[in-house]
Image: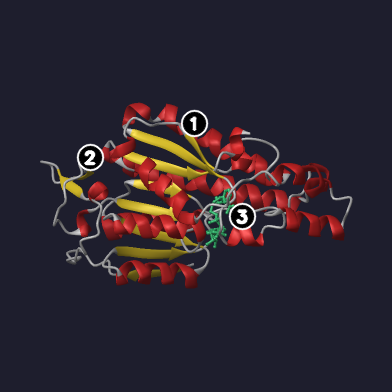
């Protein structure tokens, strides 16, 4: 586990660059607490007063796009990722644009790393306002009879248990403020059985269950929980996933023409529609985390060019 702190000293003046959307610039309450601003007035307030946002899997793809956008809009961002190099690069990119971020690297399925992420948010920035559970891994489109214990355990641990651990660790800090937002990255594979292997599909359905449970259990505490359900999105996961395109599915079938997973889902994977940019997913994550979505709780938002509507 490695901790990198960049541009995070208390009292730092963070310059604004005129491009900030004020959605996330904070106001101070009478008690000196920070809270998110719901209006859209332009402001010269320093970004340092912005809410504290943890984004997991922020070293790449959708998480990176979300971290950059949160920072552009005035949030202070904890960039959490397994990959120290990419996490550090994202923090440096945020810093270069005048934003504030800190990187925590490690495997988020490890409770000690989870604790480090949340403690860093609290120690460096004073709390946790927003948690984005986005990090995940793909499976190999394996159908149930062929799923190994190792594949099952790893996919469930990273895709489901890690978001639960992070949520459990962050909630006390949101409860203390009486306000918070959790945004989970589910998947089209969380809405049906035709967009992933068994372990990945189960994990993403369960992320939706986690989201809905949180939405109900913490509604009265001022904490909202929502999820996006991305369709095909141009990221490393999409490029690396064995079944991310019909071409790749065909390649797998060539290697193992009897492989049930790719063989059975390939007809549906040919109907994914236009591949999204990571920025198109990030825009919805940032919206759901903001006060613009103040009455949205427990929603699962497909961001999939209509794939799930078919
Ligand atoms: N790309 C798609 O087509 C697509 C479609 C549906 C859902 N999603 C979901 O979007 C989310 C983001 O994926 P992406 O497409 O940006 O992929 P990506 O591979 O580009 O990014 C995932 C990031 O998560 C990190 N990560 C993986 N395991 C981790 C762990 N144990 N601890 C900490 N960090 C870890 C990786 O290092 C990587 O930086 C995932 O939840 C994924 O399931 C993606």
Classed neighbour count for the residue bearing mark 2: other residues with Cα under 10 Å, few (<14), some (14–19), many (≥20): some
Provide the residue designation for mark 3.
Answer: 137
Q: Can residue 112 be seen by looking at this rendering? A: no
- The Cα atoms of the two marked residues, 2 and 1, are separated by 24 Å
Q: What residue is rendered at 39% in x and 58% in y?
A: 67
- The Cα atoms of the two marked residues, 3 and 2, are separated by 34 Å
Q: Can residue 232 be seen by looking at this rendering? A: yes
Q: Nearer the viewer, residue 295 or 81?
A: 295
Quadrant of the frame with the C terminus = top right
Provide the residue designation for mark 2.
Answer: 38
Q: Is residue 73 left or right of residue 241?
A: left
Provide the residue designation for mark 1.
Answer: 212
Q: Is residue 172 left or right of residue 250?
A: left
User: Is the distance from the Cβ of mark 2 to the nearest ligand 1 atom less than 8 Å?
Assistant: no
Question: Under tag 2, what secondary structure?
Answer: loop
- The Cα atoms of the two marked residues, 1 and 3, are separated by 22 Å
Q: Residue furthest left?
A: 30
Q: Earlier in the sequence, mark 1 or mark 3?
A: 3
Question: Under tag 3, what secondary structure?
Answer: loop
Residue 51 on image: x %, y %: 27, 50
Q: Is residue 226 left or right of residue 270?
A: left
Q: Nearer the viewer, mark 2 or mark 1?
A: 2
Q: Nearer the viewer, residue 26 or 4?
A: 26
User: Is the distance from the Cβ of mark 3 to the nearest ligand 1 atom less than 8 Å?
Assistant: yes
Q: Residue furthest right?
A: 258
Q: Nearer the viewer, residue 127 or 50?
A: 50
Q: Earlier in the sequence, mark 2 or mark 1?
A: 2
Residue 29 on image: x %, y %: 14, 42
Q: Quadrant of residue 137?
A: bottom right
């Amino acid at each position: 586990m490695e901790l990198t702190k960049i541009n995070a000293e208390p009292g730092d003046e963070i310059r604004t660059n005129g491009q900030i959307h004020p959605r996330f610039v904070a106001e101070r309450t009478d008690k000196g607490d920070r809270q998110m601003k719901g209006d859209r007035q332009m402001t010269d307030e320093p970004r340092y007063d912005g809410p504290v946002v943890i984004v997991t899997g922020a070293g790449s793809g959708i998480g990176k796009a979300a971290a950059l956008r949160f920072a552009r809009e005035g949030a202070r961002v904890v960039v959490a990722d397994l990959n120290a190099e990419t996490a550090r690069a994202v923090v440096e990119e945020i810093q270069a644009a005048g934003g504030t971020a800190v990187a925590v690297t490690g495997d988020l399925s490890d409770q000690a790393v989870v604790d480090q992420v949340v403690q860093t948010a609290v120690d460096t920035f004073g709390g946790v306002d927003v948690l984005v559970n986005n990090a995940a891994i793909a499976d190999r489109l394996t159908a149930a009879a062929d799923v190994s214990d190792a594949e099952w355990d790893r996919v469930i641990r990273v895709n489901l248990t890690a978001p639960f651990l992070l949520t459990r660790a962050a909630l006390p800090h949101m409860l203390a403020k009486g306000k918070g937002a959790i945004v989970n990255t589910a998947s089209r594979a969380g809405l049906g059985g035709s967009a992933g292997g068994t372990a990945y599909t189960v994990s993403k359905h369960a992320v939706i269950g986690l989201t809905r449970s949180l939405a109900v259990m913490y509604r009265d505490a001022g904490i909202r929980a929502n999820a996006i359900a991305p369709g095909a999105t141009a990221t490393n996961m999409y490029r690396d996933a064995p079944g991310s395109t019909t071409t790749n599915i065909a390649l797998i079938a060539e290697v193992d023409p009897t492989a049930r997973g790719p063989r059975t889902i390939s007809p549906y994977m040919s109907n994914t529609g236009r591949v999204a940019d990571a920025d198109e997913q990030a825009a919805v994550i940032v919206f759901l985390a903001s006060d613009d979505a103040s009455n949205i709780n427990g929603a699962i938002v497909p961001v999939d060019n209509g794939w799930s509507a078919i």
